[in-house]
Image (cartoon, grey):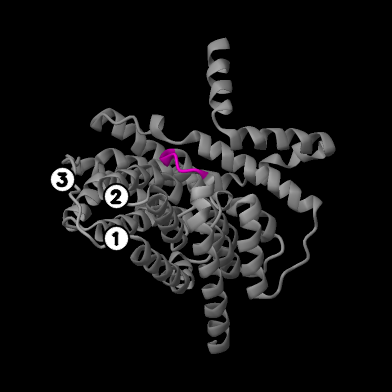
Amino acid sequence: MTAAWTVITRRIRGEPLLSLLLVALAVLALLDHTMLTRIIAYASVPTLAAIFCFLVASRILEDSGVFAEMINRLFSYSGNSPRLSLVLLVLAAATLAAVIMNDASMFFVVPMAVALARAAGIDRSKAVVAVSMAANIGSSLTPIGNPQNIYIWMRWRPTFLAFMAGMAPFVALWMAILAVYIAVTTPSVEAQLGAPPRVLVNKKMAATGVAVLLADIVLVEEGLWLVALAVSLAAALVSKRLLGSDVLAGVDYALIATLALMFIVFNEVACMVAIPPISSPLLLILAGAGLSQVISNVPATIVLARSSREWLPLAIGVNLGGIGTVVGSLANFIGVRLSGVSVGEFHRYAVKLFLAALVATIALEVLLVGLW
């Protein structure tokens, strides 16, 4: 028991955001003893279950080697062009994030961005900002791409395709801005990048991962999150017994615990600080983008959800908020932590991208409102 407690406390100390949220929870419980009776409702258990299911599916796919092979194949098409290599890595980051969540995709693409920067003579902070923003932008497209989208999807219940259709124009706009950033900041000269290591793909495991992911999407969309949970757990057990992959051991439980505490803490904060309904879509976009820079986009989603009548402006705002400061998105924090890039170096490029995306988003929203 003592050994287990030691492991838990050591893990919590290694997660500063988790530690901060635990302190905030304790303070809020002291201020309002009745909050403890609302913890289960605040935690949004169906949303956490959906996140767990998607993490299990993504872990199966990761262990199969299919993602590593996909990135390697992209690099094989780049020749010795640093610019094209970074473009392909950005596309891979955006694609992965749309499927396995932006936070998980960062563990693939950030080490490759650092290696590319070292081999090609690119400023490391530029490369890390590029893949971090790509992961945030790509994850914005689908309702399973990041925690705030899953929360919005579970709360408002748009269909999977309706969610993608609503976000697609803004995702395309943000990717175009990122493309301009890469074209301006990345050298066009050739560099000896070297051949990536070969990866052996376990096709059975890859097929299992795809099947579980598709099943989870359909089941969660129908509100059958308990069935999705059972399917994911069964798939994880099968993967361990038949394919030799301990999927459950590889799930990021610290991320799930952090999100659970975010849901509890910021739902309570939203109750304590009454925010009037925001009827203007443009104002809601600005509120989501701005608040995300201060408290991160998942808490901003929780706080603003009570004041929002429509899901799309909220989704646009909080996803736009991820394109900015380190605080704006948990993926940004992971990118900085994995790469060793300083916060100041990250902000030097990321804040400029955020401001450009903000202005362009306002213009596109005004145009779409005018057209519709």
Horizontal side, residue 251 vs residue 32: left or right: left
**Residue that carries the numbered disc 1 in the rendered image:** 187
Q: Nearer the viewer, mark 3 or mark 1?
A: 1
Which residues, given as a range, are shown in magenta?
338-342
Q: Residue at x 70, y 49 (%)?
A: 267
Amino acid type of the residue tagged 3 in the rendering: Ala
Of label 1 and label 2, which has the lower sequence position? Answer: 2
Circle 1: residue type: Pro
Q: Amino acid at mark 2?
A: Gly
Residue 195 badge: 3
* Marks 3 and 2, the one that precedes in the sequence: 2
Q: Which residue is mark 2?
A: 121
Query: Which of the two residues, 27 or 195, is positioned nearer the viewer here?
Result: 195
- Verify CB contact (< 8 Å) between mark 1 and mark 2: yes
Callout 3: few (<14), some (14-19), or many (20+) C-alpha neighbours within 10 Å?
few
Q: Residue at x 52, y 66 (%)?
A: 158
Instruction: Determine crowd level at label 2: few under 14, some 14-19, many 20+ residues with C-alpha closer than 10 A.
Output: few
Q: Position of residue 14 (x, y in %)?
A: 54, 28
Q: Is residue 122 above or below residue 15?
A: below
Taking the image as shown, residue 120 lies to the left or right of residue 234, namely: left
Q: Does dot 2 land on a helix, a strand or a loop?
A: loop
